[in-house]
Amino acid sequence: MLTSKFEGLEIKKSRVHEFMRDECNLSMKQTTCWPEARTSKENVQKRYDWVVKWSNTDMDFSRNCIFIDEAGFDINMRASRAWAPRGQMAVITTPTTKAPSHTILGAISSVRLVNLSIRVPKQHPKAKKAQGGRKRKNPEASKEDVPKGTTSGHYMRFIRETLNILDKYDQMRGFYFIMDNAPIHKQIEDMLNERNRDYKCVFLPPYSPELNPIEQFWALVKHKVRREKLQDTETLQDRIIDAANEVPIEHLRNIIQHSKNQFDNCLNYIPI
């Protein structure tokens, strides 16, 4: 680029690298892809409005909030980096067949992992060959048997289970439920109101994962899940549960504080 703009310029790539690193304070990083809508003026404004609205209440991420979201896991998840002898590739073997995805719903707070629900997809038997070499078709699966992600029924069931847990603790009365703007928000609000414990629903603005600490919680869990290959006696479900329970309370508080720190960026119209 430089040599095409400045005729006759000769410079080594290493010198350019040193200049960018030492003089410009830049470093080469792994790129992160954001949806275009995440940085749109409309959504930046929605985040500003959201922070202004809820900052004028007693809602406090570190004190009285439950954070809810879902994530997907599969058995082929592997670490993106690994040790290998110089000159050799770091190779990790994976099953040749596509692994079914496990959908996980979770709820965390600043004091504990509140609830975790794993939806394991149903497996259907493979078609068998009939005489003559042709495969017999399996009976057509019903809609209920088709593996899929979280439905409104699963989500509502999870909210109900989470409420049953919170109802046992007087100190969690009046907690705020922080979650993405689900299409079934009216049903969720009605369920919370039925408990007569002053629970409140707070729906995040669109394209705002940085405002939901559980996104970082899933990153920690996935790191633990993909760190080592599953043992012969271990299931993906076991690994997920163990990884989630191993996240220290201190880490929960740190990721919640990180999301709280984004409020200033939102008030300054900085995309997050």
Image (cartoon, rainbow, N blue to C red):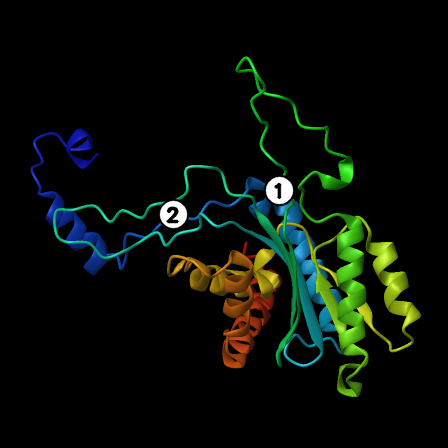
28 and 100: which one is in front? 100
- Label 1 close to label 2 by CB (< 8 Å): no
Quadrant of the image occupied by residue 96: top left
Q: On the picture, is 79 further left or further right than 214? A: left
Residue 73 image offset from top left, x and y in percent: 54, 52
* Disc 2, SS: loop
Specify the amino acid type for callout 1: Gln
Q: Which mark is residue 241?
A: none
Classed neighbour count for the residue bearing mark 2: other residues with Cα under 10 Å, few (<14), some (14–19), many (≥20): few
Q: From this view, report whether residue 238 is shown above or below residue 94.
A: below
Q: Which residue is mark 2?
A: 31
The numbered mark at residue 123 is 1
User: Counting other residues with Cα less than 10 Å from the Cα at mark 1, is it few (<14), some (14-19), or many (20 or more)?
Assistant: few
User: Percent x, y for residue 92?
Assistant: 31, 48
Q: Quadrant of the N terminus?
A: top left
Work out whether 200 lies above or below 26. Answer: below
Which residue is at the far front?
A: 131
Q: Nearer the viewer, residue 55 or 201?
A: 201
**Measuring 35% from the left and 50% from the top, which residue is drawn there?**
30
Q: Position of residue 171 (x, y in %)?
A: 76, 87
Tell me if residue 173 comes above or below residue 264 in the rendering.
below
Residue 40 visible, this orientation: yes
Identify which amino acid the numbered label 2 is placed on.
Answer: Thr
Element marked by disc 1: loop
